[in-house]
Image (cartoon, helix red, strand yellow):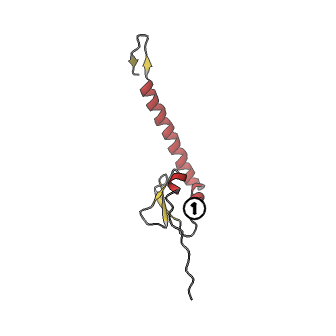
Amino acid sequence: MSLKRFRNSFNPDWEKQYNFVKKSRKGDGYFFCLFCQKDYNIESMGVSAITQHQDKKKHKEIEEEKMKNETMRSFVRNKAVLGTIDSSGYNIHN
């Protein structure tokens, strides 16, 4: 008699829980990390594979860089929208 091994599969709720997780094209036994641009196996560990992955040094470095870039883009976008208003009320672009 052989024992059937339980395999975890992707849970769509994880996409809401983790901002870097998407369903993998490799199948239900994987998740895709948007930051690292890689597929990771979840069959044996399930959601623990995601939490373990997010604690990896390389993932954290990529995440920090992405956040810095987003902050800079937001700053530049807001500065462009706000511009500078002169005394006559006209928007002066720098």
Q: Where residue 73 sits in the image (x, y, percent)?
A: 46, 36
Reply above or below: 56 against 64. Answer: below
Question: Which residue carries the number 1 mark?
Answer: 47
Residue drawn at 45 percent across, 31 percent down: 76
Helix, strand or loop for disc 1: helix
The quadrant the N terminus occupies is bottom right
Given the current orientation, which residue lies at the most extreme front position? 13
Q: Where residue 2 sits in the image (x, y, percent)?
A: 56, 86
Q: Nearer the viewer, residue 76 or 30?
A: 30
Residue drawn at 44 percent across, 19 percent down: 84
Q: Where residue 87 sits in the image (x, y, percent)?
A: 43, 10
Given the current orientation, which residue lies at the most extreme bottom position? 1
Q: Where residue 39 sits in the image (x, y, percent)?
A: 47, 61
The quadrant the C terminus occupies is top left
Reply above or below: 78 against 55. Answer: above
Label 1 is placed on what type of residue? Answer: Val
Q: Could you say which quadrant of the image residue 85 lies in?
A: top left
Reply above or below: 51 against 3. Answer: above
Residue drawn at 41 percent across, 13 percent down: 89
Residue drawn at 40 percent across, 18 percent down: 92
Q: Could you say which quadrant of the image residue 64 lies in?
A: top right
* Dot 1 alpha-carbon crowd within 10 angstroms: few under 14, some 14 to 19, many 20 or more: some
Q: How many marks?
A: 1
